[in-house]
């Protein structure tokens, strides 16, 4: 198609017009009202001070994009870059070729390889997931789990009213605060083979003022965010480190103390570290499938990268919520 062109750039190579067009196109596709500053913070405050973008141009205007955000990880004792694949879109009137998305991604991959970003992860949305599996050859690592504390039970049951809520709130306050007293701070925690490098640079890039960060010790912290899911006031535990039963219990207690909410959610993998009252939601009842996928830009087979048992994983690793 002669009017279309695929190119790739780093964020520092983007012009003022590029920032304007990618912001407008993103907002159009996803029905958002984000400004250029949002994307500059997201793409420039990274491990390399830039992100990588594949663009679909129509008559030299941006009508599609695929982005990769580089982050440092502790990878089996070494520091490695892993890229987060995100913000993939094409404007509705320009979805004329099934391979456009894949071609944007491949253009971005070439820049990634030059900067040693050889490992990629993503949580594609339900509509995009089959595409990246079929056309992009991305591999499944796991489906992330939902854990819920239904503080106001009527919001989940859709019945029961204030009496049920008073009973459930009393129950959860009692068990959470009791657990905090009973659990030992010195619970053993074994770091995973692959985990985020949670330094100041990462925290500055990942979390804006919409998040509340609680520091609990020299290295431990948890991050929460309020979000309204339809009519349910939800508090997400975005990250919790170390992901021990003691730390999760501490986070739950702090949320109960500081927030007015209906439910608490954590999305990730806990390796049975969740307290008994922080209930794992059955797969059939999850509001949305969260497929954790990976892609290798090297011919070297890396089994640990594609094994969920290697990962310390939560919403902190991604950009949703």
Image (tube, rainbow, N blue to C red):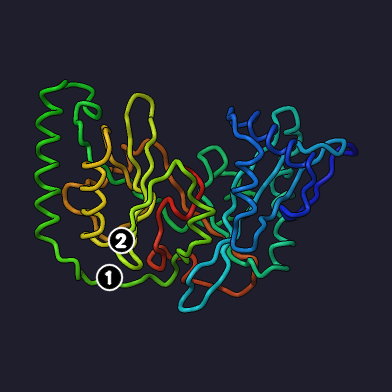
Residue situated in front as seen by the camera: 174 or 80: 174
Sequence-wise, which precedes: disc 1 or disc 2?
1
Does residue 15 lie above or below 300 as drawn?
Answer: above
Compared across the picture, whether 320 is left or right of 224 comes to right
Which is more toward the observer, 101 or 49? 49
Tell me: 95 left or right of 208.
right
Q: Which mark is residue 211?
A: none
Residue shown at the point (14%, 22%) measured from the top left = 162
Image quadrant containing the C terminus: top left
**Image quadrant in which you'd find residue 152:** top left
Tell me whether circle 1 and circle 2 mark residues in contact (CB < 8 Å).
Answer: yes
What's the residue at 41%, 62% (across, down)? 308
Q: Which mark is residue 243?
A: 2
Per the model, the C-alpha gap separating discs 1 and 2 is 8 Å
Task: For mark 1, give the secondary structure.
Answer: loop
Residue on which disc 1 sits? 189
> Callout 2: helix, strand or loop?
loop
**Badge 1: residue crowd in 10 Å (few <14, some 14–19, many ≥20):** few
Counting from the top left corner in percent of width and height, residue 200 is at 49, 62
Q: Quadrant of the N terminus?
A: top right
Q: Give the image location of residue 320, x and y in percent.
A: 48, 44
Residue lying furthest bottom in this view?
Answer: 77
Residue 3, quarter of the rendered image: top right
Q: Position of residue 93 (x, y in %)?
A: 74, 27
Q: Describe residue 64's horizontal placement relative to residue 140 as left or right.
A: right
């Amino acid at each position: 198609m002669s009017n279309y062109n695929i190119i790739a750039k780093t964020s520092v190579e983007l012009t003022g017009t590029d920032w304007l067009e990618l912001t407008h196109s993103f907002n159009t596709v996803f029905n958002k009202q984000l400004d250029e500053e949002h994307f500059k913070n997201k793409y420039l405050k990274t491990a390399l001070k830039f992100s990588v973008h594949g663009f679909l141009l129509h008559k030299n205007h941006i009508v599609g994009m695929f982005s990769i955000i580089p982050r440092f990880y502790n990878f089996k004792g070494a520091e490695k870059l892993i890229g987060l694949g995100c913000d993939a879109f094409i404007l509705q009137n320009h979805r004329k070729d099934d391979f456009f998305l894949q071609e944007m991604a491949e253009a971005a991959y070439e820049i990634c390889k030059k900067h040693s970003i050889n490992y990629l992860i993503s949580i594609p949305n339900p509509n995009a997931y089959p595409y990246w599996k079929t056309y992009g050859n991305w591999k499944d690592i796991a489906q992330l789990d939902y854990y819920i504390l239904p503080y106001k039970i009527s919001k989940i049951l859709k019945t029961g009213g204030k009496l049920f809520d008073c009973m459930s709130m009393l129950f959860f306050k009692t068990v959470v605060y009791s657990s905090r007293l009973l659990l030992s701070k010195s619970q053993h925690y074994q770091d995973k083979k692959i985990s985020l490098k949670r330094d100041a640079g990462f925290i500055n890039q990942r979390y804006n003022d919409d998040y509340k960060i609680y520091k609990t010790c020299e290295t431990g912290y948890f991050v929460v965010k309020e979000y309204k899911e339809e009519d349910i006031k939800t508090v997400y535990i975005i990250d919790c480190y170390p992901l021990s039963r003691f730390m999760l219990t501490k986070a739950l207690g702090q949320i109960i103390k500081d927030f007015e909410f209906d439910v608490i959610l954590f999305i990730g993998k806990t390796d049975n570290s969740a307290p008994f009252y922080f209930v794992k939601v059955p797969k059939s009842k999850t509001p949305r499938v969260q497929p954790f996928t990976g892609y290798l830009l090297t011919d070297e087979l890396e089994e640990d990268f594609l094994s969920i048992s290697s990962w310390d994983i939560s919403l902190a690793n991604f950009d949703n919520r």
